[in-house]
Image: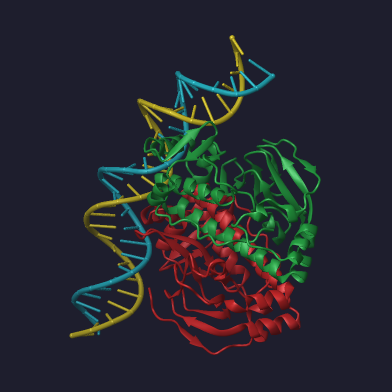
Chain colours: A green, B red, C yellow, D cyan
Amino acid sequence: MNRTPSTTRQVACEQCPLRALPHFRNFTDTELKFVSSFKTGELVAEAGAVILSEGAHSAHLFTLLSGWAFRYKTLEDGRRQILNYLVPGDLVGLQGSVLGEMEHSVETLAPSAFCIFQRSRLPQLFRNHPGLGFDVTWLASREERMLDENLLSVGRRTALERASYLLAFIHERARSVLAPPPARLLIPITQQHVADTLGLSIVHTNKTLRKLAARNLIKWHDRACEVLDVEELKAIAGWDGLPEGPRPLI
Amino acid sequence: MNRTPSTTRQVACEQCPLRALPHFRNFTDTELKFVSSFKTGELVAEAGAVILSEGAHSAHLFTLLSGWAFRYKTLEDGRRQILNYLVPGDLVGLQGSVLGEMEHSVETLAPSAFCIFQRSRLPQLFRNHPGLGFDVTWLASREERMLDENLLSVGRRTALERASYLLAFIHERARSVLAPPPARLLIPITQQHVADTLGLSIVHTNKTLRKLAARNLIKWHDRACEVLDVEELKAIAGWDGLPEGPRPLI
DNA sequence: CGCGCACTTGATAAATGTCAATCTTTGTGG
DNA sequence: CCACAAAGATTGACATTTATCAAGTGCGCG
């Protein structure tokens, strides 16, 4: 789970395939130019790579360009809580700005590429591009809303509701950043990931997922989950879905 | 639980008693002047007042000036999850910026006063005072870190650990914004609040709190909790405490 | 081929929830 | 000043959910 990632050359933001999606708001040329200069490189990693590590200092912020990853924290005895998942376009590492030391880790779920930004240039971003500064805040606020919902889920939903919410949630997030919606969307997670997100044991998670599968709402593949009926999952969880207008991409 | 709050006249930020505390970073005169003009009024409310309501549109941001409050979400059938607590200096309402509609509610726990800001003037803040813009992001990021820890707690800590963490957490936060540390600090919550924060039933919460009381770590008063031994609570939870450097106050 | 990892499953244990009373404190009205 | 109501806290008995333990299956890969 700790293979070394590698850094490669930069691809210009102006040609970023993500940016073309309707999901992301249009940037002005000036903004785009700055973001492009803000980006200092790319990080390519295979599945299971730890990109950021709890307790470590990191000089970087990352935006997931392609692939899948997740944020998590652990207790001393190894208990792990997954906090959220990253889909392409998600910015991560901002939390470290508060004191420089990361309080959570980030690990990839699949081969992934990240854009690398220098944390030290953030003040410059705020100074020269107030609109982008606002966007960063907007993204932080959006992450907070997702955490609120996850907390509600773990604290107050039943095991079946939690699992339904989680899979619907990830599915919706991934859908929104996939160019041509693929025929089948396989979420590359194991049941251990699901368990660590829901705050359940792996055995109980398995039994819960089987119930969803028995109702034809999901299909479990090897190390991957396919959502067959998002609407029914959302209904079980009592969740309305993500309020999605276009969002900034930094 | 729904008494009408009332709005009163403004008190200048330059004389804000909070700002004098070492806990808050110093602002330049220009920054202070802007913040003061950014503030358009004050909201005074008694205990149990709903300041922001899930689903509603709010044109305002609030900073808690004095008192206590909490953020929460509810499911349709009434299950409630408390997301975090507000102590003086905390900014709330930013989340609504993402789409205008609040996705959580805010309610007071004690007689409280809030500074009122116009959400519509946020862009001006970012444009004219990049440092303050960065501060807003910093605050959002800090809130996210607290949520991460709460989520870890609810998802992976045992009932006793959760209760220990929560009380130590609230106690530390309140301590840091109290001018002369008072001899006794009474946290004005009911066991129902604790239950809704920890994701436990009220009965089990009661039994858990009694264990902590039996060990002389806390003392439960009428509608209030007094922490007697923070360090031991932190040890039980395996929590290191808040990394507290000075923070901005907006 | 055999090992490791993910996934399954049944039996049992432990944690937590629900129900139903009781008790205490506080506030209110007579 | 007392009676009473309401809200919060407490407790025991019991039900349900979830965790743990222990095996097994199947598949991919060296």
Q: Position of residue A59 (x, y in %)?
A: 78, 54
Residue at 41% x, 49% y is A231
* Closer to us: A127 or A149: A127
Instruction: Left or right? Give the position of C10 relative to A33.
Output: left
Please, is residue B215 above or below residue B37 in the view?
above
Q: Residue at 48% across / 38% down in the picture?
A: A201
Residue B21 in view, yes or no:
no
| Left or right of residue A180: residue A133 | right
The spot of residue A205 in percent (x, y) is 45, 38
Between A106 and B100, the one nearer to me in the picture: B100
- The quadrant the N terminus of chain B occupies is bottom left
Residue at the (48%, 64%) spot, across then down = B103
In this orientation, which residue lies closer to the viewer: B226 or B52? B52
User: In this image, A51 relative to B177: left or right?
Assistant: right
Residue A208 at x, y = what percent? 41, 39
Q: For residue B75, what is the image quadrant?
A: bottom left
Q: Quadrant of residue B201?
A: bottom left
The x and y percentages for residue A61 are 72, 54
